[in-house]
Amino acid sequence: MTNDNMPSYALTFDDAVQIWLRHWTGEFQNRIAASFDVNPGRVNEVLKERKFIGSRDAALQKRTA
């Protein structure tokens, strides 16, 4: 039995940083979304910087560290 009545996962700032890192390695948005159990639109909101402003810069710092 699945629990389809439960809302999907809510992304966090740390998740957004991971999304940037995975996106830069060439991973498809829909695959990233599936791994977080969210709609692909939520991943797109991060990559268009509509959500979690500053996550791109944080990911850049992690990437160069």
Image: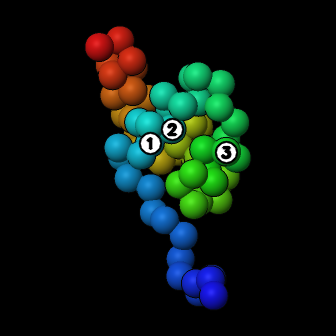
Image x and y of residue 24, in percent: 57, 23
Residue at the top extreme of this rendering: 64
User: Mark 2 touching mark 3, by CB under 8 A?
Assistant: no
The N terminus sits in image quarter = bottom right
User: Mark 2 touching mark 1, by CB under 8 A?
Assistant: yes
Foreground residue, 49 or 26? 26
Marks 2 and 3, how far apart at CA: 10 Å
Residue at the front extreme of this rendering: 1
Q: Residue at x 29, y 14 (%)?
A: 65
Above or below, comparing residue 38 to residue 27 in the picture? below
Q: Pointer 2: what residue?
A: 19
- Does residue 18 appear in this view? yes
Q: Secondary structure at mark 2?
A: helix
Q: Amino acid at mark 2?
A: Ile
Foreground residue, 9 or 52? 9
Above or below, comparing residue 48 to residue 62 in the picture? below
Q: Residue at x 42, y 46 (%)?
A: 15
Above or below, comparing residue 19 to residue 10 in the picture? above
Q: Earlier in the sequence, mark 3 or mark 1?
A: 1
Q: How is the image coloured?
A: rainbow
| Residue 16 tag number | 1
Q: Pointer 3: what residue?
A: 31
Image x and y of residue 10, in percent: 45, 63
